[in-house]
Amino acid sequence: MRFEAFSRRAAVQRGDCLVIGAFERGELGAEASAVDRSLRGRVRRVLARGDFSGRSGETLLLPEVPGLAAGRLLLVGLGTKAQFNRRSWRRAMQNAIAALIRTRIASAAIALERPPAAELDNYYFGRCVAEIVGASLYRVNDLKTERRARAPALARVVLGPVESDAAADVRRGLAAGAAVSESAKLLRNLGNLPANVCTPRYMATQARALERSYRRRVRVRVFDEAGIRRLKMGCLLAVTRGSAEPPRFIVLEYRGARRSRAPLVLVGKGITFDTGGISLKDPPSMDEMKYDMCGAATVLAAIDFAARSELRINLIGLVPTCENMPGGRAVKPGDIVTSASGQTVEILNTDAEGRLILCDALNYAHRYQPEAVVDFATLTGACIIALGHVHSGVMANDDALARELVEAGVRADDRAWQLPLTEDYGEGLRSNFADMANIAGREGGAITAAAFLGKFTKGLRWAHMDIAGSAWTGGAAKGATGRPLSLVADFLTRRAAAARS
Ligand code: BES
Ligand code: MN
Ligand code: ZN
């Protein structure tokens, strides 16, 4: 996919299609008006016929427009002019790209009206467009055997008109957005693969593939079951006990800054399938538990993004990965195990397994004396009840770090919301037999899960992101969403820039 910014008049842009927008009630913005003038009022005449309302979601493709340098003209509804903002612009852009992809158009010039600069500056303008194009072109790596739909033709998008002093920022944004969508593809592919393919060993080969793609910058170390035992990760070992698939603990290192600079550690939950274990889940939609490794995939994708973008930052990725299965050797409710930190845990519910594999990985993070630690996990159904599929949950022992993540999500249109993590939430984890239990009752379940993790991050600046609701969607568009990679990419990019200045 090639992206460029153009500065000359839209009507003289060549290529297969020019894309312009129209508001409801026949109103045209500045870009569309200029095109209409070049076409001697052709656009307004189309609108006057009443065939195009300008409502959001509507598109109209006009072939062979006399006077137009491009082969076709695509009209895109922008909704009402009074309500035009970043959100409606984004929807219009998504509709425009979707309409282009349905055709054989290979190169398109896009001259849609832009929201006010205060809502979307030049950099994010470019970044948003490249991310939307990348996400729209994504096709699930399915295993269907009938004849496949033809791949979309779209290969070149030029954006404008952009003033010459803005072009550099737009181009930077386009490049960043293209990198985000490449890395998001890795995250989505891993999420969508079935659990009989995407096993812990497969996750490790994917990490190794990153090492091969980015020689020198990315190093990978993989611990097998014996290695995990040497690390005394008793909680991770407890979860994997019921499974015939061997577990892995994957350590990735990306070095983009000088060695003396403390790294940022990213930790991801890599349960490649979650049956619940002996505390077995109900059958309906259990298949969706193949997505339970999306936190781990977020970490791999974040390393991929950093390396691809050559960010001046040091990153460590920690990925504990295994299956959660019932079986004759499986861990049982009431079993007590010793975590790598030395603290003992009474496993009251084997379905609360994510926190068990994460706690051993979080403990491992201490050795890096990191600048900060962020973990990503499809951790609780309770987070979906609290925030739906809209916001990811953020919980932290450091409010500034939580704020940084929330603000990155706002800039990237990949929203997150902070939930309170006060000491009160840890009280329900008390156990009569061990240092703590792994569950604390139904109420506030997303936060009590975080409170459990908090017992292993003392002395670290740490934030936890619960992505159970945001990482995938059900229904007709069932699949991995690529979230929260855009948020993470923004967070990392800002941190790299802040350290340099
Ligand atoms: N992987 C699930 C969380 C989940 C549920 C993600 C639904 C996406 C959709 C996690 O391991 C789990 O089972 N959590 C339990 C915790 C409970 C036993 C305390 C839950 O949320 O029900
Ligand atoms: Mn579970
Ligand atoms: Zn799980």
Image (cartoon, grey):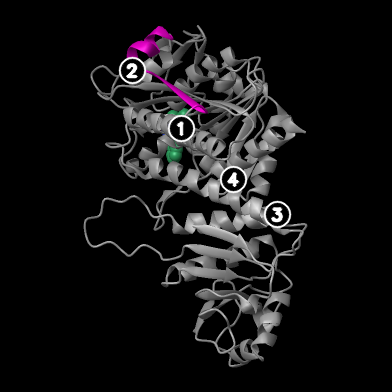
Mark 1 and mark 3: Cα distance apart in space: 34 Å
Label 4: how many Cα within 10 Å (few below 14, some 14–19, many 20+)? many
Is residue 442 or residue 103 the one in the foreground? 103
In the displayed structure image, the side of residue 186 where residue 470 appears, left or right: right
Residue highlighted by disc 4: 391
Q: Nearer the viewer, mark 2 or mark 4?
A: 4
Residue highlighted by disc 2: 331
Q: Is residue 10 above or below residue 433?
A: below
Residue highlighted by disc 3: 168
Marks 1 and 3 in Cβ contact (< 8 Å)? no
Query: Is tag 1's residue or tag 3's residue first in the polypeptide sequence?
Result: 3
Amino acid residing under circle 4: His
Residue 68 place in picture, x, y as percent: 58, 84
At mark 1, the secondary structure is: helix
Is residue 13 or residue 245 the one in the foreground? 13
Is ligand 3 less than 8 Å from the beta carbon at label 1? no
Q: Is residue 68 above or below residue 185?
A: below
Query: Is tag 2's residue or tag 3's residue first in the polypeptide sequence?
Result: 3
Query: Is tag 1's residue or tag 2's residue first in the polypeptide sequence?
Result: 1
Is residue 167 or residue 471 the one in the foreground? 167
In the displayed structure image, the side of residue 211 where residue 158 appears, left or right: right
Residue highlighted by disc 1: 296
Instruction: Tell me which segment is drawn in magenta.
Output: 216-231
Marks 1 and 4 in Cβ contact (< 8 Å)? no
Amino acid residing under circle 3: Ala
Query: Is tag 1's residue or tag 4's residue first in the polypeptide sequence?
Result: 1
Query: What residue is shown at x 31% (from left), y 51% (from top)?
Result: 142
Label 2: how many Cα within 10 Å (few below 14, some 14–19, many 20+)? many
